[in-house]
Amino acid sequence: MLSKRIIPCLDVKDGRTVKGVNFVDLRDAGDPVELAWQYSQQGADELVFLDITATVENRKTTIEMCKAVAQQINIPFTIGGGISSVHDAEALLNAGADKISINSAAVRNPQLINDLAAAFGVQFVVLAVDTKHLPGGDFVHLNGGRIATQLQTQHWITQAEQRGAGEILLTSMDKDGTKSGFDNVLLTQINQLISIPIIASGGAGNAQHFVDVFEKSNVDAALAASVFHYGEILIPDLKAMLKLKGIEVRI
């Protein structure tokens, strides 16, 4: 059985890690390179960096951050934000990223998924999906959750898998920052539709929520931000609890 992965997420704005509730009310959470080093020491399995304003701003600083992180840590990390071409992705992979995450650009140009998978292999391509429950179902949102689309989440994710996405980072905007637990119903539904790994995101508030998401939805990884950034959950303690519950993790 593959080990379940614990992944801290660093939302980066203007070179700083930030965290909010339901994608708004952002507050500072520290230096991303320093946090990356701390998490690698604590036993995080991977890291995800999302430049949350890169789609609407300049993305140059992300390359420099990527290089700095690669020099500091020895665990895989994914970078997303503002990637809209094979050239953009190549620059980040060359700077040290292990995987790249795409979101808004892929919705606007689905062929980008095919192009990235063909250029680098499906294992490098993570599709990030920000989803919100609205009348009529679950719908994809773009630009850091600012723009609602008429694209149904389930349809989009199944299409993305067919196009070559190697992993889905699924964030429930309804749960994001609320610390009320992951959206296990939606995650279970999506997991039954696709065969590629899912990273659950949005809603982690305590260690039991990680137990629940793995037991109820059987996702491959669980991601969180503020509970790790502010020391509310320590990764060694979390992994010890998961192990006690019979959930396979890398210690």
Image (cartoon, rainbow, N blue to C red):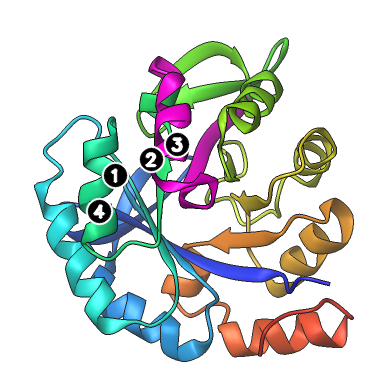
Classify residue 192 by image quadrant.
top right
Q: In the rendered image, which residue does mark 1 sit on? A: 89
Is residue 83 in view? Answer: no
Q: CA distance from mark 3 to mark 1?
A: 12 Å
**Secondary-structure class at tag 3:** helix
Q: In the shown orientation, is residue 8 left or right of residue 87?
A: right
Query: Residue 118 magenta-drawn?
Result: yes
Q: Are marks 2 and 4 in contact (CB under 8 Å)?
A: no
Residue range corresponding to the magenta coloring = 107-132
- Percent of width and height locating residue 245: 88, 80
The 10 Å Cα crowd at callout 2, few under 14, some 14 to 19, many 20 or more, is: few
- Percent of width and height locating residue 77: 41, 65
- Percent of width and height locating residue 63: 16, 56
**Secondary-structure class at tag 1:** helix
Q: In the rendered image, which residue does mark 3 sit on? A: 118
- The numbered dot on residue 119 is 2
Q: CA distance from mark 1 to mark 2?
A: 10 Å
Single out the mark in the foreground, 1 or 2.
2
Mark with earlier residue (4, 3): 4
Q: Are marks 1 and 2 in contact (CB under 8 Å)?
A: yes
User: Is the residue 105 above or below the residue 45 in the image?
Assistant: above
Screen quadrant of the C terminus: bottom right
Q: In the rendered image, which residue does mark 4 sit on? A: 92
Q: Amino acid at mark 3?
A: Ala
Query: Residue 40 magenta-drawn?
Result: no
Q: Are marks 1 and 4 in contact (CB under 8 Å)?
A: yes
**Residue under the image location 61 percent in, 22 percent down:** 156
User: Is the residue 32 above or below the residue 115 in the image?
Assistant: below
Single out the mark in the foreground, 4 or 3.
3
